[in-house]
Amino acid sequence: MTYASAINGSGERAIPVFVVCRSQATAADWIRRAAQLPGLDVRPLLGVTSYYKAINELLQGGIEQPVLLVHDDIRCGFDFAVAVRELLVELEQKFTNWGVCGNAGIFVDGQHVLRHLRDPHGGPDPGTDITPVLVVDGNTLLLNVPALRQGEVRLPDFEGFHGYDVALSIESWLAGLAVFCDRRLFVMHKSGGDQIGFDRFCKGPAFTSYLASRLINTTLPTLNGLLDLGPSQTFRHLDYESSHESRKDISVVFDDVLSHARRTAPFLTIICRTQLVRPELLERAMSTFAMAAVEAGDLVQLEILVASDRPHPEVEAATARLREQFPGLALRGIAVAPQQERFSRVGTLFGAIMACQGDYIWVVDDDDFVFPLAVRPIARWLAPGGQRLIVGHARRFEEHWSSSAAEARCLKNSIELEKLRADGVFHAFDGDNHTPVCSAIFPLSVVKERLSRVAARGDYYEDYFLLMLTLTSARVEVICIDADIAGISLRPGENTVTLLDREHWDMSYATFMNELLRLRSATSPLFWQLAHRPGSSGLAYSPSSGTPVSRRLSPSIWPLLFRRTLFHLQKAGWRATVLRIINYLRR
Amino acid sequence: VAEGKGTDWRHSFDGVAVAMSVNQANLPIYALNFLEPRPLLADVLNERLGQDLSLHHPGRRLGFGESVNLLFSLVCPAAGFLLVNPDCIPFPGCFDALYQTFREHQDAGIVEARQWPLEHPKEFDPVTLETPWSSCACCLLSSEAFSAVGGFDPMFFLYNEDVDLSWRLRLADYKALYCPDAFAAHYTGLYSYRPDRLYPEHYYSAKNFIALSYKFFGDNGERRAIALLQAAPFPQTFKDCVMEAYRELKPRLSRYPAEVDPRRFKITGFNLYHDLRFSY
């Protein structure tokens, strides 16, 4: 059966494709090409002088189904209709309110660009899910015409062919309709765009004034660069005493619309592993979860799973106490019985993971904590059933807690040591653990599938093992976000990571890596080749550079020593100048 | 004193309740929602904290300082009172440490808790604990000192009122202290502000920076503050907006009646009132 019969025989209406043609010749080309595009109803638009007006007319017309609006210089595949129809089904299944979907766009953080096309700028990026984007590129647009009409979306009456996709994206978001980007709209775009024309129009006063009349933001990221709205902005809305502001913060709109557009909010479980021996740290972790739950709002369903190797009644009692202290948290406890074949820390963690039912897990041990304000940037990337590994920055703190037996332990000092950056996750393929487990949010379905294949007989390095198992899954997509998401408490003499005797550590490492490398699905040579290609790791080492491995594994101690000294001086309460050090010593 | 959102109230009081239970304290709590003068979550709060909570509704929008002044006049705390922002959760032992420091320094006007996880980078003396100004995000204030200086200046609707209060306390021979042993989690938006917009904190801080400079250092202070604002990396339209707002505020400002020593009361940069120990 051909695609044509598959689509036409199904009795479904063809998808209208409006092609904005610059000439009779390109229109004729598209008419001729239409015969090769079954399931698409190609309708060339001639004589268009304004993309804005063309979209407005389309929205005001009598069309009652989603349509495609494309440039005349794109080339779609023979089975494009099948892909679009599949996408439409998924959009309907997953979202209640969507307005526009394209094949390229920029995320709300202005840092992640998604491209599912081939054009003079390059080829496609991978993509596992339909992804919300702040601004979509206009080369190929799937417009949910009925929804846009109902939302009374109308573009400003500008002439020309620049900025309409920016305006359409913003107007769609403001009307409560989400804007997405998806790989199924992949096309070949024969043009790289007209940057000079874009700059002239979109960075000009008319366009920026229009945006400033709709948004309170001072900048707006687009695929063609950052638009500076500052000169066109007014700021009296910042005054609580006199503000009556109807304009919006586009990021807030993005979050609000997205949380309402999803039929189901993604489910995130924070697994807090504890032996119930340091209640003050557990309590602190919980307080950060409580703040995170408030911050998450409707973007994500948050659940806390207290996982322990202690007996069931103890875990239940502790969980009940925490529930009383933090009534706003969805909290449950799990007692993972010690297993003969696994070390306790590994058995507890992996047992808890297998008991989870949601979409994502975030492993935060009781002595770690989360940065509550990071939940929003994380949640934006989560989707039900998603397969993304979200990695953020972690900050390490050296802490001192009072040890008086007579009273509850109190935090006495906390010194920030260093920041472990999210993009260090790719160093994992170099054999080093650069990503603390609490700085990654794992896709549950992937992790469960991977864990079902392993015995996990090691002890320490279980977090690295978990990370490597996930990274070597062919399904996972890594997203690094530029936000502090977790804090790690180092307490001299209390953390296993600070043990001087590394034998148990080394044996665990060997056990886990040996098992990983025996796992057929984890040893796709391409993963490791890509990870080890020169320049990919960012470390001052590559097989061709000649840098000794010993140097790679043992970075100079002096910068670390200097940093630590400085922090110890800073905790004394003053900036470390020579004069102040002398004064301090004299005192 | 909270600024509005219902959810903020809830987690804030959860946090305070946790700290109180660990401290084995039985402190009465007084709450005031200064931006939304209507009952919010009263049931939740009362359920959570029982009889320890008194919720006040001023019936109109008040500034932060004015709200505290109102609560102070209603409650009349005997020795001192704690101020806790809704985005703060005091750690176990925090109140005890603040109180200990307060008791050990007879001339303490205000004792500030140490913010966690990111400590405020401003200077303090590790021996005397003195600091140029104390943040009111989580602090213990002396009732006597607060009364003596007339409480907060209501001209500062929001932000910088703590610098103003600290300076006036110090000028009245009270001390502004920093207590490094008293930890309070403070999830300030400051560290998560996005670069694509400006926030009320930017606006009020800029306006009140000029007001504070004028109040304590007269025309010269005002001139310098305006120059620093003009050099700051904000859009010119924002600076114009701040200047317009300041011009509206200025007729209501009263100059501090005595000469102020700029070496003791520092302005080290735009909206900076201290030397930095480190920066993030």
Image: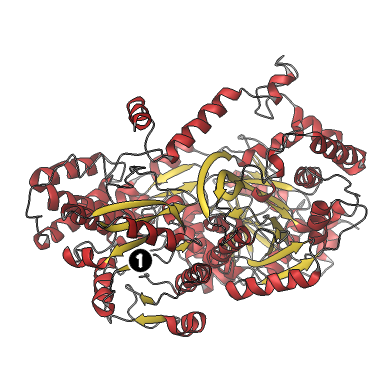
The residue sitting at the front extreme is A406
The single residue placed furthest to the top in the displayed view is A546
Residue B18: x and y in percent read: 52, 69
Residue A145 shows in the view: no
The C terminus of chain A: image quadrant: top left
Count of labels shown? 1
Front residue (pair A333, A12): A333
Q: Position of residue A506 (x, y in %)?
A: 81, 34
What coloring was used for the rendering?
Answer: secondary structure
Left or right: residue A202 versus residue B267 is right
* Vertical order, A149 against B256 (above or below): below
- Residue B187 point in image, percent of width and height: 47, 57
Left-right relation of A150 to A304: left
Kindly state the secondary structure of the residue where label 1 is placed.
strand
Please give the chain letter of the residue carrying mark 1: B
Image height of B172 relative to B267, above or below: below
**Quarter of the figure with residue B29:** bottom left
- Kind of residue at badge 1: Leu
State which quadrant residue A552 falls in.
top right
* Picture quadrant of residue B76: bottom left
Against B185, residue A75 (above or below) is: above
| Residue picked out by circle 1 | B83
Near-viewer residue (A301 or A2): A301
The local crowd at label 1, few if under 14, some if 14 to 19, many if 20 or more residues have their Cα within 10 Å, is some
Q: Is residue A579 left or right of residue A341?
A: left
Tell me if I can see residue B15 in this picture.
yes
Is the N terminus of chain A in the top left, top right, bottom left or bottom right quadrant?
A: bottom right
Q: Position of residue A481 (x, y in %)?
A: 59, 47
Front position in the image: A170 or A44: A170
